Image: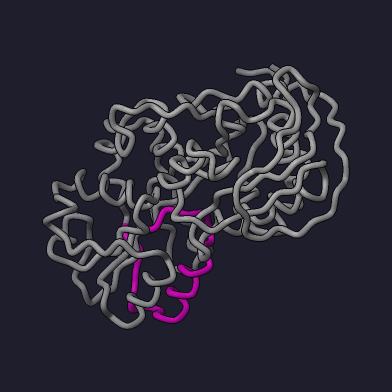
């Protein structure tokens, strides 16, 4: 267990709205600095506009801008894999990512085969729930039943696409040949489910996700969630971050809880991210968590006692300071 002593944080106040942004244009503090952000602009890579990353990322940008000397903006992206790639390229300063994608990045596996990425974690966030929703008329009752079906596997280079492919492979299906995979963002996926051009979807996101709520409300008993936990043992062989969880019935007004696979989210930065900025942003996540919860209920599951548990992604030195290590 880690020590959870919290150092004092001195935070300057600058008011600015969170919007879409580009590349960082100023550096603040340096390694070994106090837990205080320097001046400058930072950008946060989030995810699809209909997903939880986008909402929580915008809220985090607003908090950073209001409670530190940094001015932060949040941008819509394709999510995890793209976020890591663009973080390393310097297009963004902070990035949301699923822990499985982040682990692939530092280990040089999956989409980063043979090319380990030099990224660091600020903190572990809330878990993403794997949400597999199908039209009842499709006859799909398990992942194996997706053979030959029209399935949205998420945006290209997203964490959803990674886990969708792994679920299919775990069920003995080739994602490239055995299903009619549609690489769609969540908005287009919702449209396809409504007009009947899709048989099902895979989505990895927080609870509740607004566009999944829209689908379950508008389509009612025409759709249902699948239990994907039969694939969990094989998923764990690929990456040990996968775990069993549940989609509570209340999340989408369903008749019963649905067992599923969950994956933690992490907030990533490059190795070169200033230590003072890393420390200040990390402390802000937990000291102002109640404000994030008002923006989206998924933030309730951001737990300080688990915040430093980002293995195999190393914590940034500034975040180690924030956790009192």
Residue drawn 57% across and 39% down?
Answer: 267
**Residue sitting farthest toward the front:** 25
Q: Which image quarter: residue 278? A: top right
Classify residue 166 as left or right of residue 7.
left
Where 125 sits versus 239, above or below?
below
Q: Position of residue 256 (x, y in %)?
A: 43, 63
Judge by depth and name the residue closer to the eye, 215 or 274.
274
Q: Residue at x 44, y 35 (%)?
A: 102
Q: Magenta stretch?
A: 203-226
240, above or below 17, in the image = above
Q: Residue at x 67, y 60 (%)?
A: 19
> In the figure, residue 201 lies in which quadrant?
bottom left
Answer left or right for 314 relative to 198: right
Q: Is residue 215 magenta?
A: yes
Please state the horizontal and vertical placement of residue 197, each as a whole percent of the image.
26, 78
Please provide percent x and percent y for residue 284.
75, 39
Q: Dividing the image into 4 quarters, which one contains the N terminus?
A: top right
């Amino acid at each position: 267990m880690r020590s959870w002593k919290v150092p004092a944080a001195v935070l300057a106040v600058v008011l600015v709205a969170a919007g879409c942004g580009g590349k960082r244009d100023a550096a603040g503090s340096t390694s070994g600095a106090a837990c205080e952000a320097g001046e400058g602009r930072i950008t946060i890579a989030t995810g699809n506009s209909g997903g939880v990353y986008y909402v929580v990322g915008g809220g985090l940008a607003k908090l950073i801008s209001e409670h530190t000397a940094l001015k932060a903006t949040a941008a819509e992206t394709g999510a995890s894999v793209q976020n890591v790639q663009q973080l390393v390229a310097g297009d963004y300063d902070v990035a949301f990512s699923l822990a499985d994608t982040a682990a692939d990045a530092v280990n040089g596996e999956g989409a980063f085969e043979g090319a380990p990425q030099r990224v660091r974690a600020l903190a572990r966030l809330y878990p993403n729930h794997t949400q597999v929703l199908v039209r009842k008329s499709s006859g799909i009752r398990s992942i194996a039943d997706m053979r030959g079906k029209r399935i949205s596997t998420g945006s290209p280079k997203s964490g959803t696409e990674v886990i969708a492919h792994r679920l299919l492979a775990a069920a003995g299906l080739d994602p490239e040949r055995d299903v009619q995979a549609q690489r769609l963002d969540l908005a287009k996926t919702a449209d396809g489910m409504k007009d009947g051009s899709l048989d099902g979807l895979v989505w990895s996101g927080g609870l509740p996700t607004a566009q999944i709520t829209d689908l379950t409300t508008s389509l009612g008993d025409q759709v249902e969630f699948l239990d994907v936990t039969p694939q969990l043992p094989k998923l764990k062989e690929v990456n040990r971050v996968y775990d069993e969880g549940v989609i509570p019935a209340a999340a989408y007004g369903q008749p019963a809880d649905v067992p599923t696979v969950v994956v933690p989210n992490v907030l990533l930065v490059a190795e070169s991210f200033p230590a003072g900025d890393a420390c200040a942003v990390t402390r802000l996540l937990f000291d102002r968590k109640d404000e994030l919860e008002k923006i989206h209920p998924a933030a309730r599951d951001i737990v300080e006692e688990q915040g430093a548990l980002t293995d195999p992604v190393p914590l940034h030195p500034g975040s180690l300071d924030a956790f009192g290590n």
